[in-house]
Image (cartoon, rainbow, N blue to C red):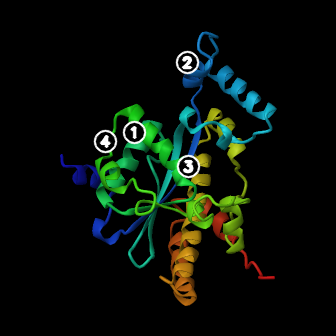
Amino acid sequence: MALADTFARLMAPEASTRTAFLVINTESVPDGRLLSAVKYAGEHLSPSEAVQRAHSELHALGVHGSDSMPVTFQVPVGVSLLRVGPDFELQSVACLDAPQFRPREIVNKFWLALSFYKAKLVTFNGRAFDMPLLELAAFRYGFSATDYYQNSRNRFNGPIDLCDWMTNFGACRMSGGLNLLAKLLGKPGTMEVTREQVYQMYLDGKMREINDSCLCGTLDTYFVFLRTRVLTGELSLEQEAYLIAEAKELLESKTEEFPVLRKYLANWTDFASM
């Protein structure tokens, strides 16, 4: 079966030519087996013991959160993907490999999507985290990513990393991160689930809740992306407002499929300028 046919069967997409951007976000957890085998080789630690030891060492250094764990020791447990048209209109939302959320299949579907749509990736801090995470996962599982490696892996002409873009390519720190930028726009930002909670949620089998949080972060990324296109002059404020209203209608139509969207929509605010 051809690659496009395979992906069409898995995702039931519309015509790929209508998709210009793929906005993505990931959630990940530490790989205890890998930590035990590499970082603590010879100490015979169980996976959970290795993760606890690594977190304790990081906390002793004043470093907290799952983001503090080197990306090389993490594995994806959630990837959310938004399809966006060349006019910046939100077309669809998806949590990959729902409802099973199997890491191998999540990664497989991501690289299939990227190959099928041939769209520009949009992330927040993707160059430092999300893409290395997914690249290492492709390496782990042996998945091909030909188009990405041959044509898209370029800092300035490749994927759009909004964190990189907003910090003048690392010249300053984006203290507050995506949460801050989303809240500046009146969007929910971080609600209940924080990075620090994801690993325990994973151990508790709360994969749907992890992926719900991932989806909300992807939506925040999309709305931040729209505002950056206002800054570049590709959109006017009036066009942005129209796209936000259209996106809100789409999300309202998806609340049965994604119940978390009710909470996301309920947490929109009007953030008044000073």
Q: Are marks 1 and 3 in contact (CB under 8 Å)?
A: no
Q: Where in the figure is residue 24, as x and y percent of width and height?
A: 49, 57
Callout 2: SS: helix
Mark 1: few, some, or many residues within 10 Å (few <14, many ≥20)?
some
Residue drawn where x is 43% and y is 42% of the image: 135
Identity of the amino acid at label 3? Ala
Residue drawn where x is 68% and y is 46% of the image: 195
Q: Outermost residue, front direction?
A: 171
Q: Quadrant of the C terminus?
A: bottom right
Between discs 3 and 2, the one toward the N terminus: 2
Mark 2: few, some, or many residues within 10 Å (few <14, many ≥20)?
some
Callout 4: SS: loop
Q: Are marks 4 and 1 in contact (CB under 8 Å)?
A: yes
Identify whether 193 is placed above or below 36.
below
Q: Which mark is residue 128?
A: 3
Identify whether 226 is placed above or below 43.
below
Q: Is residue 177 left or right of residue 150?
A: right
Identify whether 106 is placed above or below 222.
above
Front disc: 1 or 3: 3
Between discs 1 and 3, the one toward the N terminus: 3
Between discs 2 and 1, the one toward the N terminus: 2
Q: Where in the figure is residue 130, as x and y percent of width and height?
A: 52, 49
Callout 1: SS: helix
Residue 56 visible to the viewer: yes
Real-space Cα distance between discs 4 and 1? 7 Å
Real-space Cα distance between discs 1 and 3? 16 Å
Between discs 4 and 1, the one toward the N terminus: 1
Identity of the amino acid at label 4? Ser
Real-space Cα distance between discs 2 and 4? 26 Å
